[in-house]
Amino acid sequence: MSEEKESLSEDVKKDDDYEKICSICHRPESKAGKMIELMNQITVCQDCLQKSLQSMSSLGPESYQALMEMAKRFPNMQMIRVDVPPEVPQRQRIKKKSAQKEPKKAFDIKSIPAPHKIKASLDEYVIGQEYAKKVISVGVYNHYKRVATDTMDEIEIEKSNMLMIGPTGCGKTYLVKTLARLLDVPLAIADATSLTEAGYIGDDIESVVSKLLAAAGNDVEKAEHGIIFIDEIDKIAKKKNTNQRDVSGESVQQGMLKLLEGSDVEVPVGANSKNAMVPLETVNTRNILFICGGAFPGLEDIIKERLNKQASIGFRADLKDKYDDDPDILAKVTIEDIRRFGMIPEFIGRLPIIFAMQGMTKDMLVKILKEPKNAILKQYQKLLALDEVQLEFEDAALDAIAERALEKKTGARALRAIIEEIMLDIMYEIPKDENIGKVTITREYIEHTGGPQITLRGDLVVYG
């Protein structure tokens, strides 16, 4: 009995942390006012209760007609069963706002890591991209200094949203994920391809903020200091040569202007659409850092065209094919290039920090295989170590893997697929023989001209 009482008291404490929601209009207590508790944990706001009593008092013999009139008065009304307590999903419950409005210790100026420390932490997980890591470290540092000094004096620091441009597989999403984990702030990753103008099939623009609220555990104060990464941002560029309404292109850019700049947005809790019968919560996006990323296919041609036009005529003029093999052509991007790609000037103006990421080279792919803390090779070495087998890769084998990955032209994503393919037979055969003590992957095995080098526990070498 004592254990049951303790569990009940813990449940009551947990319920006290969340706001009560009206069972009829689904508004939280912070918006509808104090709730009236009925039997079986049913809560109703005073407005709905008063309107319900007035409507019931007007019921006559024409019950059906009266109920229809009542439904017209309350478009959000939902019939509830008094004998069954309403169940509100955990993801739709809203946490109570703390009574004290003191600044959080997490955003104290002294507790914010310096840019060089942020970059040093990123170096442990992200290979290469030195310029991108430097830009994002300074941008995030300045953003959270802005949050910490919000009410310090009359000088207002503007928000430093970012636009990240880079080919597929260069680590855009991975860089932001690592950053959010190091800073211990809520992160929401949204895909711009699913966003449409309000009223059309697809996710509303405010759904990106709703995802951040869910990542923060429905804690509004925590969500207002988070990071939103919008991937595939190039897919909402203006559509060219179309006579139809552009509901997933320019109109989405225009709808996102208020989010990027900072405004109060009403977002549904635990849903992607405001039309769902879920409570709405107001989130201020003024202190939310927006990082947009995209591959921008075809942007290289726009940059080359601009650079070739600038070339002079004569013996010292630049050749037209001078930039064809330039691996860092995206680093020469300008705002005008992005505007010609299809992004509207108002949208670009709200992303003041624009930087490009490098494409993957052979040396970078080899380093990605073995140097990061959670490198792919280290993961497989740990898997085989559980079977008491040592796994090694020859340098020539790593070069062969990187060469195959470059041929696929999908960046670092190709490495995982190649490693999975070459390790399949080894992971299948190793548990069969307990005498195997070491496996060495050779270049011949990668190129399918030979097998791996297998060492038995008695130092006997066998070539597979």
Image: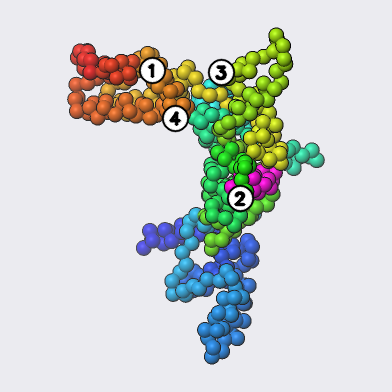
Closer to us: 204 or 440? 204
Instruction: Write down the residue under mark 3.
Output: 325
Label 3 – label 2 distance at C-alpha: 38 Å
Badge 2 crowding class, 10 Å Cα cut-off, few under 14, some 14 to 19, many 20 or more, is few
Instruction: Write down the residue under mark 4.
Output: 413
Q: Which mark is residue 400?
A: 1
1 or 3: tag closer to the N-terminus: 3
Q: Tag 4's secondary structure?
A: helix
Q: What type is the residue that disc 4 sits on? A: Arg
Residue at the outermost right position: 154
Badge 3 crowding class, 10 Å Cα cut-off, few under 14, some 14 to 19, many 20 or more, is few
Residue at (36% x, 26% y) in the render:
419
2 or 1: tag closer to the N-terminus: 2
Quadrant of residue 29 in the image?
bottom right
Instruction: Write down the residue under mark 2.
Output: 244
4 or 2: tag closer to the N-terminus: 2
**Where are the magenta residues, as a range?**
244-262
Residue at (59% x, 85% y) in the render:
57
Residue at the outermost bottom position: 61
Q: How many marks overall?
A: 4
Q: Tag 1's secondary structure?
A: helix
State the image coordinates of residue 174 (x, y, percent, origin top left).
Answer: 51, 32
Label 2 – label 1 distance at C-alpha: 49 Å
Q: What type is the residue that disc 2 sits on? A: Gln
Q: Find out whether residue 416 is within the magenta segment.
A: no
What secondary structure is the stretch in magenta mostly built from? helix
State the image coordinates of residue 450 (x, y, percent, origin top left).
Answer: 26, 16
Q: What type is the residue that disc 3 sits on? A: Asp
Q: What type is the residue that disc 1 sits on? A: Ala
